[in-house]
Image (spheres, grey):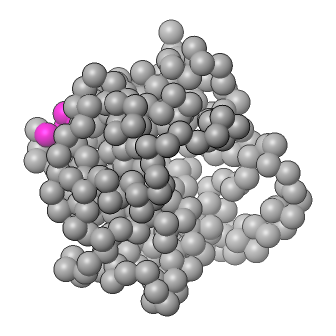
Amino acid sequence: MDKKTLRKVQLVQLEIAKEIARICEENKINYYLIGGTLLGAIRHKGFIPWDDDLDIGMIRSDYEKFMQIAPKCLDDKYALIDWKSDLNYPHPMGKIIKKGTIYRESKRNDNGNQGIWVDIFPYDYTSGIGKDFAKKTFKLKVLRSLVRAKCNYQTWQSGEGIILSKYIKNLPFRLAAIFLKKETLVEKYEMLCVEDENLKYLYENGTEDYEKWCFPREYFIEQTRAEFEGCYFSIPQKYDEYLRRAYGEYMELPPENERENRHLIEEINFGE
């Protein structure tokens, strides 16, 4: 993706994020910039120059409240999708997309709505990283793989290589999914996520690496604000601890050969 196109994508994502923030602030819903978006806010006061997505997180109770309220409050330019409302959508996190746009990942076989999006990740409670968490996340990954298979969503993209071995690895999930209902799989997944809200850790639900994105809950108890592309958004008050845990010396730029887009996008249309 060339720099001019990437910047146009980022500005649409910023527009979506502002709409999410508006709904949250009007309805007393806590949200946070997370991941590379939070890193961009602190290090660049905006997008990481080569970043092609924007991520927001909410603790599960706020996430569920947002999912209920957003369809009634969203500007008509946008739509909310999640794996309960869209039979073809395979992910445990919701998205807000801009209608009339296309942002299609390469060879994903994803039949769901693929407009330019912002991801909204629920954060769920756990007692911490250990054997119990490993067992739980193994079950989550199995259920998630079954949902993906049910939605005909492949977990690799063109250009990643070893496609045949990856297809064979996923074949058992595709066969099993024939006999299962997506609604049942989603219900089992979300029931497994329910934990005591007094537990001391929160993990990002929807990531590929549950352990990396598991943090002490104290990081999220209080919020502060950070500048992002000339606007101000909520971030965890303990953003420094979060970023050091996730990225190490996060103010240092990565080598130039690592400064690349994360998504392989095969089709972009801004609806203009």
Q: Quadrant of residue 5?
A: top right
Residue 236: x and y in percent read: 25, 52
Would residue 230 be visible to someone looking at this image? yes
Q: Residue furthest top?
A: 272
> Which one is nearer the viewer's eye here, 212 or 187?
212
Give the magenta part as a residue range. 21-25
- The total of numbered circles placed on residues is 0
- 262 vs 74, left or right, is right
Q: Quadrant of residue 52?
A: top right
Compared with residue 161, is residue 150 higher up or lower down, i.e. above or below?
A: below
Q: Quadrant of residue 122?
A: bottom left
> Which one is nearer the viewer's eye here, 79 or 127?
127
> Which one is nearer the viewer's eye here, 41 or 265?
41
- 76 vs 188, left or right, is left
Q: Main secondary structure of the magenta part?
A: helix
Compared with residue 125, is residue 122 higher up or lower down, i.e. above or below?
A: above
Residue 141: x and y in percent read: 57, 72
Residue for point 34% across, 39% down: 42
Residue for point 37% across, 49% down: 34
Residue for point 49% across, 66% down: 212
Residue 144: say if magenta. Answer: no
Residue 108: x and y in percent read: 69, 45
Q: If the image is split into quadrants, where does the N terminus sit? A: top right
Compared with residue 63, is residue 232 higher up or lower down, i.e. above or below?
A: above
- 261 vs 45, left or right, is right
Would residue 115 be visible to someone looking at this image? no
